[in-house]
Structure formats: C-alpha cells, structure tokens
Image (cartoon, rainbow, N blue to C red):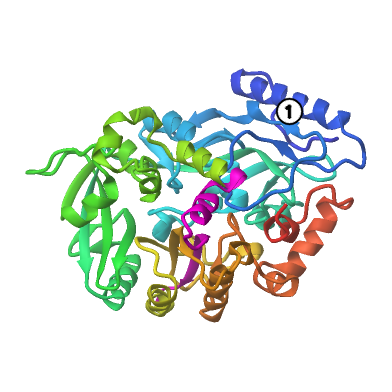
Amino acid sequence: MTTVNSATSSGTWQGRYAALLGDVRGQFAQLSPAAPIRLTKSTSNLFRARAAATSPGLDVAGFDGVLHVDPVNRSAEVLGMTTYEHLVDATLPYGLMPLCVPQLRTITLGGAVTGLGIESASFRSGTPHESVIEMDILTGSGDILTVSGAADDPHRDLFFAFPNSYGSLGYALRLKIELEPTKPFVHLRHVHFATAREMTQAIQEIVDAKEFEGHRVDFLDGAVFSATEQYLTLGEMVETIPAGLTVSDYTGMDVYYRSIQQRTHDVLTIHDYLWRWDTDWFWCSRAFGAQKPAIRRMWPKSKLRSDVYWKLIALDRKYSIANKLAKLRRKPLREPIVQDIEVPADQLEEFLDFFHREVGIEPIWVCPLKQRDPDVVWPLYEFDPNVTYVNVGFWSTVPMTDGADPSEGIINRRIERKVTELHGRKSLYSTAYYDRDEFASIYGGKTYAAIKKIYDPEDRLLGLYEKVVGRQ
C-alpha cells in the first residue's frame, strides 16, 4: 500500500493522523490479496439489508474525531468516521459550523459525502460533498490518495465521482472541509400554505432571493401534514433573542414537529437547531410511543435520540417482530416506505398529489436544494445546476393488500417510477429496486464503470449496484 501526500509531519494532529494511517496499513497488509475490502462498523444509518460479513473488515473506530479547526481560514481537518455530533461540538466553540449539517447526530462526515446528505442550508450551500476541499481516500487497490477538485490534481476524477459511490470506490479517511460563521440563536418562522402550489412558489422565490418578507433566510425546510396543511420553516441566525420570544427546548417533553403547527415564531440555540429533528427522529419516535406524555416522562432524556430508535428498528428487522404481531392479530402485513427523493421544484406539486393519493404517509419532510457551484459536475448524482430541486422525505409503513409480500416493494417501486417520470432521483441509503440498466442511466453508469476500473481494478470493493440494489 502506498500513501500520496498524506500528513506525516510532526505535530499534534499530524502525528495522530499518521499513527492511524499506519494502523490501517497494517490491517490491510494482513488481508488476503483476494479478500474483499470492507469496514467493521458498529453503527449505521442505512435502511437496506446487507449480506452478512464473510471476511474480516478494517477496524476504523479510531477515525472518529476532529483533527484540527482553523478559525482563520474557516476550515477543519476531520477523520472520515467522525459523527456530525462530534464535528459540531468541535466547531461551534469557534463560532463555526459545517456548511451543511445532516439532521441526525450519528451520520458521519465520510458517510454523508460518499452517501450524500442534506439539510436546511442546502438551498444556499448545497450538500456536504460540495464543501469538501480535499480528501484522503483508501482505494480498492490499497492506495491512500489525497484527492481534490484542483485542475492539476491527477486524481480529480475520483474526487468528483466519490459522492454517491457508497464506499464502492473507496473510503474517506480524512476530509478537509469549509466552515461558515454562526450566530448564537436561530429565529424560526413557520409559514402556513394551503396548497402545494403556493408552497412551491414560495420555495422558488426564497431560493432565488435568500429572504422572505424582508427577512434574511439562512435555513429553509418544511413539513407537509396534509394536502391542505403545509409549512415552510424559515430560519435566520441572530445574535440576540428577538423581543417577545424565549428560547425553546425540544430535547425533553416538547416535540419539535408539533410546534410547527402551533407557533408562528420560535427561537432555538444554534446547537439545538442543528439537532431539532434528532430528538424524535423527525416524527418517527411516535412508533415507539415516545411522544405519549406518560411514556415520555419515563423515557431517559439522554435516550431520546435517533440512534436509539434505529437500534429498535434493527431489532424489528432482525426478528420481524411487527409482521409476526400483525399475523397474530390477523392484520395486513406492512411494507416499509423509508425514502428520500429529489424532484425539480416545478414537479413538486405533482409528486405530492401522487403521494397523497397513492401512498398516504404523513407528515412528509421537504427540503429545497440547489447545486452550489454551477460549473461542477458530480457524475454519480448529477443535477441540473440551474434548477432548484426539493428533497421529499417519508419514513413509515403502509398496509399491504391481497396478501402481498412486503419484500416485493410494490409501493416503493411505484414511487421510483414516478420519481423517474418527473426527472428526479432518489437517495440510495434505503431499499432500491431498479434494474441494472435503469440504475446505470440514473447514477452515472459509464463514468462509474471507468473510474471503478482505475481505482479498484480487482473489484475488491463491492460494486455500487450490488450494494444498493443487490441487498449487500
């Protein structure tokens, strides 16, 4: 294994990083030359089945941490397995934050870059990979390459293809990222819209102007409770608490998403704003009774977290608890619908009409996004850089009819077809059902195949299609 331009000089963070690289090299050297390369991880934010491991993995537990924060140049050197919870804890004391902070605490920086992430700053700052300056990537051939988007970088093809590759082209060990200034508080305005058309028009106006009714908009997302009740939440970072308001706390008894229906204005600390969705996993904690007052009083507040709910879901998936109970009660089995999709903003109304009519899950999350640099092409998840898109997130189950098998993905397939029809695409962290040719046409097939051949010539990393559609 070789290392290109990696940090090896003496010094606190450089020395620590060099030691970690040495450990990875040692582990890699112990693998059989034909053995597949994978990581050993105790946690995941993926919602698709994976094949059981049949070979040893690389232990990268030590790659969780922020190596260095540079407040002058507003950048940070970050290990690839660092959770955003740990990343934010390291940068906020400097009055800085990543340009896009995905909404769940245990999403890792490397995972958000190779698997994509999104949040309410994405309408102005894009997604996490767009603020990466350079990365060290462990490739399938065993090299550790420092890659960037610089015109003279010999590995810039890997830099641009890495987002949405889900570890099939390599693993990010270190990332240098941009940071932006914060303010102590976020003033929220929850704006109601009676129709999807009105909400869509407002989205497009805000994305273009970065303001609404004379107020700056730093953060923008929304919640759809029904076809006649939808809200955009507009966040503005402020130095002081606006007159007449107090700081809210949604880490205990109060539930954030319910406040959207109940309040026109609200204030959160910047820290609590970033994790406002994590406490109840958006609204998914209701499946465990965690939003019922009697249960919530007894639930340890430190365990009101998305990773706790994820572990409960993992148990259900492993033992099919919910479907076994449904059979005992003679109730229909239920198909999991856990997806994030993106459609052009001018197609949002049609998608929501379809979704209300044929799926019926509520609430729904909406989050506008636009590519930050219109001159860049990210081939494995390519957007029209001149178009505003809207991410639509929905996470629940629906009852099956006529004895259908949930594993067939009938509703999921229907959603995929509609998204493709509307010139959109879906995130690949969850189940996907595309055939190989359709998948390649959507997710950069020819470009991916060429880069895969260069950086993983022996196919020691599982291919992208095999990972996200092949259930491995």
- Could you say which is closer to the camera, residue 221 or residue 99? 221
Q: Which residues are magenta?
A: 317-345
The total of numbered circles placed on residues is 1
Judged from the image, the secondary structure of the residue bearing numbered disc 1 is: helix
Closer to us: 89 or 47 = 47
The amino acid pointed to by label 1 is: Leu
Q: Is residue 9 left or right of residue 244?
A: right
Residue linked to disc 1: 21
Instruction: Report x, y in % for residue 372.
Output: 48, 60
Residue 435 against residue 431 in the figure, above or below: below
Residue depicted at 62% across the width and 37% down the height? 80
Q: Is-magenta flag for residue 389?
A: no
The image quadrant of residue 404 is bottom right
Look at 52% across and 61% down and name the residue there: 333
Q: Magenta stretch: residue 331 in it? A: yes
**Given the current orientation, which residue lies at the most extreme right position?**
33
**Residue 222 picture location, percent across and down:** 32, 60
Looking at the image, which residue is at 28% across and 51% down?
A: 257
What x and y, as percent, mark residue 464?
Answer: 72, 57
Can you say which quadrant of the picture contains the N terminus?
top right
